[in-house]
Image: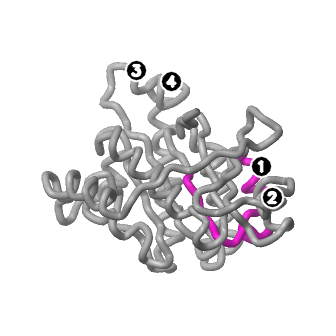
Amino acid sequence: KDEVLDLKELPHLLIAGATGTGKSVCLNTIVTSMLLTHSSEQVRLLMVDPKGVELTPYDGIPHLISPVICDPADFAPALEGLIQVMQQRYQRFREVGVRDIRSYNDGPYNPLPSLVLVVDELAELMLAGGRDAESKLVRLAQLGRAAGIHLLLSTQRPTVDVVTGLLKANIPTRICFTVASQVDSRVILDMNGGEDLMGRGDMLLLTKESPQPRRIQGAFVEEKEIAGIVDHWAHPSLPKAGEAPLEAEV
């Protein structure tokens, strides 16, 4: 049986797993799914890739708010910019008398795209930004849904200083791939089980609808498939130099 999740309904997702267990493949599967079904007018992506290897192949697609962010010095400004967009959207909603992006887009206005923050290694972002990064992420998790802003966070270090209690409380939907210990499993799932998974996409999916995680097999997307999708989007409409898409997408 296929499992299909709508990020708009989740509205955020936290993924954890040891190296080589399928975590990054899952992240790429979700991103490519969005690219296959949504134009850049429908969804925009802000990608943070501290290692500079997992998400950089997406550079050049028109969906990107900015080039993939790899420099730790750029993490905090990127989060702050996303918060400013969220505040500006709420201001616009108040001005026209609607409650959320769905109502706004159903009205006689230029539709706003969904904005998705994709982070390949949450631990590096938290290390670079500390409490400030946590507070910004929590704020986006708490208030982002109505503004059409969603978080897609991934880490290979599910420790309490990375996956904090506040962050977990605001991201109830989580995926656990194979982890090293019961402690790591409890950090991401609040229960044991992740340490017994078999790797290669074997995962436990925890959602707010169910107190117990479901064991499912992750889909697999090859690098050449990613390259084909990127090539499809990148060549017809390369981003223009000097664009300020964050401001343009408010």
Q: Tell me which label, 4 or 1, sits earlier in the chain.
A: 4
Pointer 4 residue = 98
- Quarter of the picture containing the N terminus is top right
Residue at the spot x=55%, y=26% of the render?
99
Q: Nearer the viewer, mark 3 or mark 4?
A: 3
Pointer 3 residue = 106
Residue at the spot x=31%, y=49% of the render?
248
Circle 4 residues within 10 Å: few <14, some 14–19, many ≥20: some
Name the amino acid type tagged 2: Gly
Query: Would you say 156 lies left or right of 34 here?
Result: right
- Quarter of the picture containing the C terminus is top left
Query: Would you say 17 lies left or right of 182 here?
Result: left
Name the amino acid type tagged 3: Asp
Where residue 15 appears, as percent x and y from the top left, is 63, 57
Name the amino acid type tagged 1: Ala
The figure's colour scheme reads one colour
Residue at the spot x=57%, y=62% of the render?
22
Name the amino acid type tagged 4: Val
Query: Would you say 16 lies left or right of 95 here?
Result: right
Whether residues under marks 1 and 2 lie with C-beta atoms below 8 angstroms apart, the answer is: yes
Q: Tell me which label, 4 or 2, sits earlier in the chain.
A: 4
Q: Nearer the viewer, residue 43 or 219?
A: 219
Pointer 2 residue = 165
Where residue 180 appears, as percent x and y from the top left, is 76, 72
Disc on res. 193:
none
Disc 1 secondary structure class:
helix
Disc 3 secondary structure class:
helix
Vertical side of 52 occupied by 101: above or below: above
Separation of disc 4 and disc 2 at Cα? 32 Å
Disc on res. 169:
1
Residue 162 forms part of the magenta stretch: yes
Separation of disc 1 and disc 3 at Cα? 31 Å
